[in-house]
Image (cartoon, helix red, strand yellow):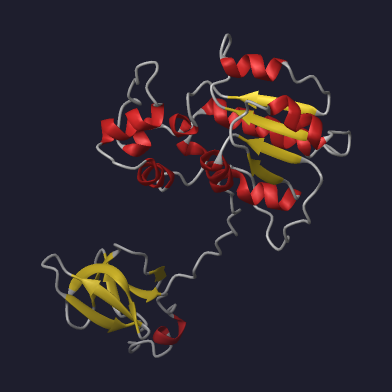
């Protein structure tokens, strides 16, 4: 009779303990204490488990130190995935160009009707315009637009873009614009009575802008509807709700994009 095979233990394969990434919410049991919980993080190299009662305990990542579905495993801290660099987008929706300084102002210009128009354009398209070296200048209305254009002396290398409020057929603004005939001048506009109205109404907490009777100052009427005394206060309230092109109406976006393309050609 032969005794126990003394070589039997040497030939038996060593049991391999699988390694498992300790991903958030993975439920395991500490092999020594029997504490069972979900992975909620790491502290000082130890994994933090939280049981169903909200109690938390830390356990070292020891070999075969945990049970997963009743089987021994070695937990390991997951390797952090490399996050691709996100492309920064300007308020206008353009891809931001990092490390590029604003250009020296070019001869070409964009005119808008007033300081509120200029502030809104700066809020949305300021980054783009600085890179292109285009200055936005506010006018005090467009009643003298033709004479101001003549004084500017537009040329191929000195283009002029003009953004006009309430540019609709039959309006006073449409008649003023029709008097300007210069291939180096592009005039675009939006249908809104004032640049305030080009801001989407839901951004200021209303379904639509109030209708102001003809003959009444539009801004004063809006202020009264909102219970605001001064137009300057109302404008600050409106402007702080604008952070990107998504906060204004499409006609304004289209008009400004056309002007920027026109004055930056070449």
**Residue 64 as seen in the image, left or right of residue 7:** left
Q: Toward the viewer: 91 or 122?
A: 122
Q: Is residue 51 visible?
A: yes
Q: Residue furthest right?
A: 156
Q: Residue at x 44, y 29 (%)?
A: 197
**Relative to 90, is 62 above or below?**
below
Image location (x, y in percent) of residue 70: 24, 67
Going by the picture, which residue comes out furthest to the top?
A: 170
Task: Kindly identify the residue that appears in the image at 73 percent across and 17 percent down.
Answer: 179
Q: Is residue 221 above or below residue 8?
A: above
With respect to residue 133, does 199 lie above or below?
above
What's the residue at 88%, 39% (across, down)? 157
Please tell me whether residue 256 is drawn above or below residue 30 in the rendered image. Answer: above
x, y percentage for residue 229? 29, 41
Measuring from the top left, give residue 59's x and y in whole percent. Answer: 27, 82
Q: Quadrant of residue 16?
A: bottom left
**Left or right of 160, for residue 69:** left
Which image quadrant is residue 5 in?
A: bottom left
Q: Quadrant of the C terminus?
A: top right
Q: Is residue 93 left or right of residue 30?
A: right
Q: Nearer the viewer, residue 264 or 66?
A: 264
Q: Based on the displayed image, in which of its 4 quarters is residue 63 positioned? A: bottom left
Number of on-image labels: 0
Q: Is residue 71 visible?
A: no
Position of the N terminus, as image quadrant, is: bottom left
Give whichever of 175, 128 is nearer the camera. Answer: 175
Q: Position of residue 127 (x, y in %)?
A: 63, 51
Looking at this view, is 241 or 234 the one in front? 234
């Amino acid at each position: 009779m032969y005794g126990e095979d003394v070589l039997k233990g040497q030939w038996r394969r060593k049991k391999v303990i699988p390694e498992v990434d300790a991903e958030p919410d993975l439920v395991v049991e500490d092999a020594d204490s029997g504490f069972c919980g979900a992975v909620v993080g790491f502290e000082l190299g130890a994994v933090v488990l939280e049981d169903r009662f909200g109690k938390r305990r830390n356990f070292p990542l020891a070999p075969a130190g945990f049970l997963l579905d009743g089987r021994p495993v070695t937990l390991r801290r997951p390797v952090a995935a490399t996050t691709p660099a996100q492309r920064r987008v300007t308020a206008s929706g353009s891809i931001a160009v990092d490390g590029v300084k604003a250009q020296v102002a070019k001869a070409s210009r964009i005119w808008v009707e007033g300081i509120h128009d200029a502030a809104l354009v700066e809020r949305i398209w300021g980054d783009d315009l600085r890179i292109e070296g285009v200055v936005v200048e506010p006018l005090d209305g467009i009643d003298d637009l033709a004479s101001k254009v003549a004084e500017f002396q537009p040329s191929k290398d000195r283009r002029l873009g003009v953004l006009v409020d309430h540019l609709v057929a039959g309006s006073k603004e449409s008649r003023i614009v029709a008097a300007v005939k210069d291939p180096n001048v592009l005039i675009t506009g939006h249908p809104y009575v004032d640049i305030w109205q080009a801001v989407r109404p839901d951004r200021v907490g209303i379904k639509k802008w109030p209708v102001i009777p003809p003959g009444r100052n539009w801004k004063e009427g809006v202020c009264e509807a909102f219970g605001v005394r001064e137009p300057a206060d109302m404008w600050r309230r409106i402007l702080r709700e604008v952070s990107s092109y998504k906060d204004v109406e499409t006609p304004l976006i289209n008009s400004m994009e056309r002007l920027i393309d026109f004055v930056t050609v070449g």
